[in-house]
Image (cartoon, rainbow, N blue to C red):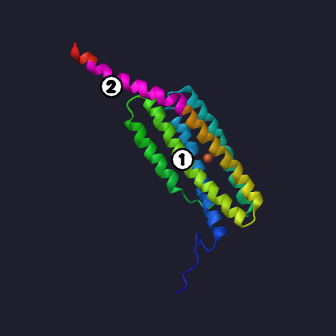
Amino acid sequence: MMTKQQNNDTFDIYDLLLEQIRDIYDGELQQIDFFNELSDSTNSFELNEFLQYHLRETERQTGRIESVLEELAEVLSGESCDGIKGLIKETRKLAKRCLNDEVCDAAIVTAIQHINHYEMAGYGTAIAYAKALERHEIAEQLLETLREEKRADMGLSDLAENQINSHAKWSAIVEKIEPRIGAKK
Ligand SMILES: [Fe+2]
């Protein structure tokens, strides 16, 4: 039986490319709001600097997707990206449970890295579809963002390994030990 065609019906790899691009776009928009919210909760100066930088980068990435859609002569569908929504929700829950600022910073780093990896999968897939369709100019633009996401991920790993995780480790130990010392008196 034939079903009536819907806007989001997916027939071919081009439809998959479009779906992926629209999903990524909404994910980037959600991150702009979220990074603004997070910058009030960070304790590390360097992490805050990173967030500000990545926020501006994310704004440019949304512009890049808009121009990709324009080149494809397509419009936004207004669909929301449940994947990024879920990751943001998890982060809020985790940050609320963190009992000290340094541990909260470590939690924020892992949260952004989870988001970045979701994005890398999305951009990587979209690039592969664009190449399969021989839309190399589209693949090029998406690749530019994928490179930025990878750089951001490596920057966060560096920050975590060289600063944030050790600060979180020591501040957590001090906070756990101090109440016991006080109790002996
Ligand atoms: Fe992004």
The verdict on label 1 being within 8 Å of ligand 1 is yes
- Please name the amino acid that badge 1 sits on: Ile
Q: Residue at x 59, y 49 (%)?
A: 29
Q: Which residues are magenta?
A: 160-180
- 42 in relation to 121, above or below: above
Q: Residue furthest front?
A: 161
Badge 1 element: helix
The residue where tag 1 is placed is 115
- Please name the amino acid that badge 2 sits on: Lys
Q: Residue furthest top?
A: 185
Where residue 107 sits in the image (x, y, percent)? 46, 37
Quadrant for the C terminus, please: top left
- 108 in relation to 46, above or below: below
Where residue 153 sits in the image (x, y, percent)? 59, 41
Badge 2 element: helix
Q: Residue at x 62, y 40 (%)?
A: 152
Whether residue 175 is in magenta: the answer is yes
Where residue 124 sits in the image (x, y, percent)? 63, 55
Distance between the alpha carbons at the discs numbered 2 and 1: 31 Å
Whether residue 143 is in magenta: the answer is no
Question: Circle 2: is it few (<14), some (14-19), or many (20+) Cα within 10 Å?
Answer: few
The residue where tag 2 is placed is 176
Q: Nearer the viewer, mark 2 or mark 1?
A: 2
Q: Is residue 30 visible?
A: no
Q: Residue at x 67, y 64 (%)?
A: 129
Q: Residue furthest right?
A: 137
Front position in the image: 154 or 62: 154
Where residue 16 sits in the image (x, y, percent)? 62, 66
Question: Circle 1: is it few (<14), some (14-19), or many (20+) Cα within 10 Å?
Answer: many
Residue 84: numbered disc = none
Q: Residue at x 40, y 42 (%)?
A: 93
